[in-house]
Image (tube, rainbow, N blue to C red):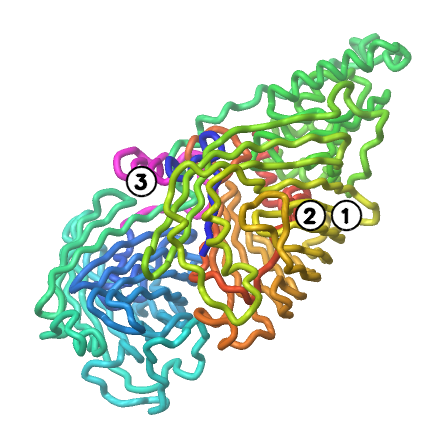
Amino acid sequence: MRGFLDFGGIAKPAIAAVTVILGGLFGPVAQADIIGTPVSGPRPTLNFYGTAGLIDMPSAEVMPDGEFSTTISHFGGITRNTLSFQISPRLSGSFRYSATEGLNLAGFETYFDRSFDLRYQLLQQQEGGWWPSVAIGLQDFVGTGIYAGEYIVASRSFGDTLTVTGGVGWGRLGSYNSFGAPFSNVRPSFVPGDTGGEISYDQWFRGQAAFFGGIEWQPTDRLGVIVEYSSDAYRTETAQGVFERRSPWNFGVEYQVNRSLRLGAYYLYGSEVGVNLAFSFNPSRPVTPVSNRPVPGPLAIRPDPAENPDLWTVDWVENPRARPALGERLREALEAEGQDLIAYDLGAYEAEIRIENTRYTAVAQALGRSARVMAEILPPSVETFHITLLDEGLAVSTLTLRRSDMEALEQEPNATEALQAVAGLRAAQPTEAEDLVDGVFPRFDWSLRPYTRTSYFDPDNPILINLGVRLSASYEFHPGWRIDGALTQRLAGNLDQARTSPSNLPPVRTSSPLYDRQTGIAVERLTFSHARSLGNDLYGRVTVGYLERMYGGLSAELLWRPVNSRLALGAEINYARQRDYDMGLGFRDYGVVTGHVSAYYDMANGYHVQIDAGRYLAGDWGATLSIDREFRNGWRVGAFMTLTDVSTEDFGEGSFDKGIRFSIPVTWFTGQPSRQSVGTTIRPITRDGGARLGVPDRLYERVRDGHLGNIDDQWAQVWR
């Protein structure tokens, strides 16, 4: 897996991670202006697999909606590191990276394993009700299968202190004191050295089953005591002497340090002492109170025309000095609100401004602040405001508001909903040259920042990292016409120790470690691009140059995205040529035509689905399914999988491409408005099948911020 993080000023991922931890451990957590599901009450226990459970067994409890948890657990030579996410109020998923010392499988003395879990709460215990919570789960359903197991489990709470759990497990969870095979005796077993990564439908809830259960008692809000009966025989581990399993009974004591950190100590299987550290955080629970954000002043109200008729004159339109003077005042006031004024058109009764939002995560907030500026500066005769959003010169959408509606509604109890009902949103037209602010173009920008490049899950070196500096620059001739580039210089690191995996396909991604051995100045990216609105809800982009660190070439894209629709369709075609390993200006012999047709759908409530079908870098044909959840404060979490016509044998370890990704807005850490974010993509393993070209500035992500679904979700912030 190749993850890449750009420190970007205060958005340093290492500092950000430390800030989250320190803020959770030592700082108070503010609840002001929380967006999303409130978080209250004690956390469910997170077991040694990093999911809601007892000690080593699962329970039917769930984490709060949107909750993330990271757990590190260790006992008997087994270390498990798990990242879990409560995808919806009832559905959760986990990614785990485990290391077992002394487990000599596939030629490794310490066996490293990657696995995914899914669980769904079928029934939730209601306050005062008798029915328990019931959940069904798949453990290690995409992986080698060494931890594979399925379960149906019920948990019943009695008051605030006692929870009883009981369930039936299959696979690993049905390996001790089994009572039979209720559905099928046939269950494929774990095969050492297998490539793994396939979804093993043929083993779910098959084979021997066994009961498990336990009790958790919480005498205080912070202290918990757990007794558990485990149905996992640990046959593979005990057969190789990893540890000795003498008893099915486990005992533990846990302490909730604060709402984010939980520590536990345990005595397991009659022979081992174990420890568990669980750290939880939630997009709805920012590190720094968002109430620190500056609030706008009251809307400027026009004078009564009957009392001040002279102020309502339109004579200013004929004054040749009025337009530039008003434009300069607009530019200065918008700049103070984090909005760059690119163009404007002023008439006697309506006016349009074209802005680029550089400050606010919520586009609706940027629109609201811009409308306030227009109300403060423009003459009283201007009744209709048009605010056009631009993204690096690309005209995205135009919001239309009547000034009188804003004046009448600002102090109303339902002001937000009422303003939304009378506002209009339409596709934007390209920017006219005569409307451009004098001196805005050409624009030049540059930055010099540190960067990291990381590699995970190498069996010999699980974590590798390079540190360096990146010099980035852009030159924009005219709206939508740009040159972008970035040079990097590695300063320190050990990514040159990463192994180059053998492949049955063209080494389109497995050769990535060869690029990491470059020690001099590298041309990371150098492109010339043009993007524009084409009318009829169409957007187009052409990019040529060194598109990414491994490939250069030509890319063309067309996107159909009606501004008021949740559906978008796109098509992209590229010619890509592999670059030399020194990341200079030269190329290697390998070239390929690649491209995709794409469908995007905004499912509302923050859920987004994307399907890309076409040809990938290795010449394979297939499709990628991506599902993301985006929170109103800018947090974004997603997962993806790619299936192509490459066989599992030719693909190699992992069987098919898959991964998870996340992005965290910097404002979540700082409490100050910002468009910056930090994040990464985690792949269990990087192979050549299903590899897609990394083209910068694809259109959908550029235009969707200014379209109906996104603005609707954020509209509550239009008055803020």
Magenta range: 17-42
Task: Give coordinates of residue 509: x percent, y percent.
Answer: 53, 59
Q: Which residue is mark 2?
A: 699
Residue 137 at least partly seen: no
Task: Give coordinates of residue 437: x percent, y percent.
Answer: 77, 21
Amino acid carrying mark 2 in the image: Leu
Q: How many marks?
A: 3
Task: Give coordinates of residue 596: x percent, y percent.
Answer: 69, 61
Q: Could you tell which of marks 2 and 3 lies nearer the N-terminus?
A: 3
On the image, which quarter does residue 101 sit in? Answer: bottom left
The circle drawn on residue 21 is 3
Between circles 2 and 3, the one closer to the viewer is 2
Amino acid carrying mark 3 in the image: Ile
Q: Which residue is mark 1?
A: 540
Above or below: residue 102 compared with residue 536: below
The circle drawn on residue 504 is none
Q: Could you tell which of marks 1 and 3 lies nearer the N-terminus?
A: 3
Q: Residue at x 24, y 67 (%)?
A: 109
- The N terminus appears in which quarter of the rendering? bottom left
Amino acid carrying mark 1 in the image: Gly
- Asked if labels 3 and 1 touch by Cβ distance under 8 angstroms, the answer is no
Q: CA distance from mark 2 to mark 3?
A: 35 Å
- Asked if labels 1 and 2 touch by Cβ distance under 8 angstroms, the answer is yes
- The C terminus appears in which quarter of the rendering? top right
Q: Is residue 38 magenta?
A: yes
Q: Residue at x 84, y 31 (%)?
A: 432
Above or below: residue 370 compared with residue 256: above
Q: Is residue 30 magenta?
A: yes
